[in-house]
Image (cartoon, helix red, strand yellow):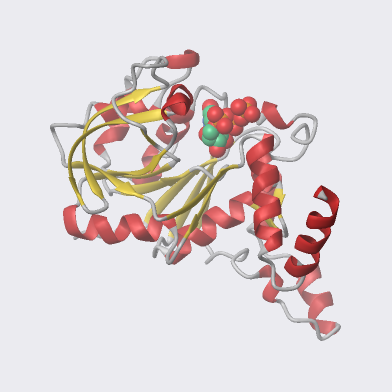
Amino acid sequence: ELTIRKAVFPVAGLGTRFLPATKAVPKELLPVVDRPLVQYAVDEALEAGIETMIFVTGRNKGAIEDHFDVAYELERIQADRGKPLDALKGTRLTPGNAIFVRQQEPRGLGHAVWCARDIIGDEPFAIILPDELLIGREKGCLAQMVAQYEKVGGNLVCALEVPMEETPSYGIIDPGARDGVLTEVKGLVEKPKLGTAPSNLMLPGRYILQPEVMGLLATQEAGAGGEVQLTDSMAKLIGKQPFHGVTFDGERFDCGSKLGFAQANFALACRDAAMGAELRGWAKALLG
Ligand code: UTP
């Protein structure tokens, strides 16, 4: 049966590029306009039909659990004031469907995913990196991927074209045959040296994987940057199971970087029904 019920959100990273903001506040709770990054990620998962949200957290990440809890006092006070609770939409997950596990040390994305192995069990699952904010044109990124999964099964990674000179920053696909939005994946390389990338298709942090990847992660040695790389374990599944890239239809904001985060805030605020027009006018005047 080709359905995906569980999603892993690795949120244990230190977020050092955002210090001092991330000294006490998790990077994943930094807001783009009025929603924290992790809320966009959960909304994307809900839209794709995901039921169980598994957060791989670490030290100083307790506020993420509070965010998805019931804020009894807040709800009560808002209700007494006759204020709608729409603003809290998506923050109250079904009881038992928000699961938190700890990655005691930030040993890399692959290690973070492996920390969820017992909750995943023998089911295929999705992974969403909340600091990659993906705004789909018609549907969300994971929903786009689930639609393809229902056709081809196996393993899927989101794929996005970037300028060739940017490839050393990313996981990159070695592409095979292409059929519409699906590209056969022949290989994966993490952060290739400039001029060596097999394509300009990067992996923007959305995956649908078969549970066998967990066994591979268990024995995975540290790779690029001294971290356990998810890419290295995924690469070992190629040839054994179907493996495709799904070209994403939409926009990407790299909210793990200050530039991408600022761009996301500006772009989404400019489209906001309440303040967009005023902000665009102000920005025009500011820039002359
Ligand atoms: P990043 O590479 O952006 O690292 O992780 P980071 O620690 O969050 O941020 P910087 O580079 O220090 O500023 C990508 C994603 O993987 C998670 C992060 O939380 C983020 O969502 N991650 C990374 C983990 O959960 N554990 C890790 O050991 C590493």
Of the pair 16 and 137, the residue shown nearer to us:
137
Residue sitting at x 75%, y 61%: 280
Q: In the rendered image, which quarter contains the N terminus?
A: bottom left
Residue sitting at x 60%, y 56%: 39
Rendering coords of residue 133 (x, y %): 55, 49
Image-based side of 88 in relation to 5, left or right: right
Image-based side of 244 in relation to 129, left or right: left
Rendering coords of residue 258 (x, y %): 69, 36
Rendering coords of residue 219 (x, y %): 32, 20
Instruction: State ligand 1's quadrant.
Output: top right
Rendering coords of residue 242 (x, y %): 16, 42
Image-based side of 130 in relation to 76, left or right: left
Residue sitting at x 70%, y 52%: 266
Figure quadrant of residue 221: top left
On the question of residue 30 being in view, the answer is yes
Q: How many marks?
A: 0
Figure quadrant of residue 172: top left
In the image, farthest residue toward the front: 288
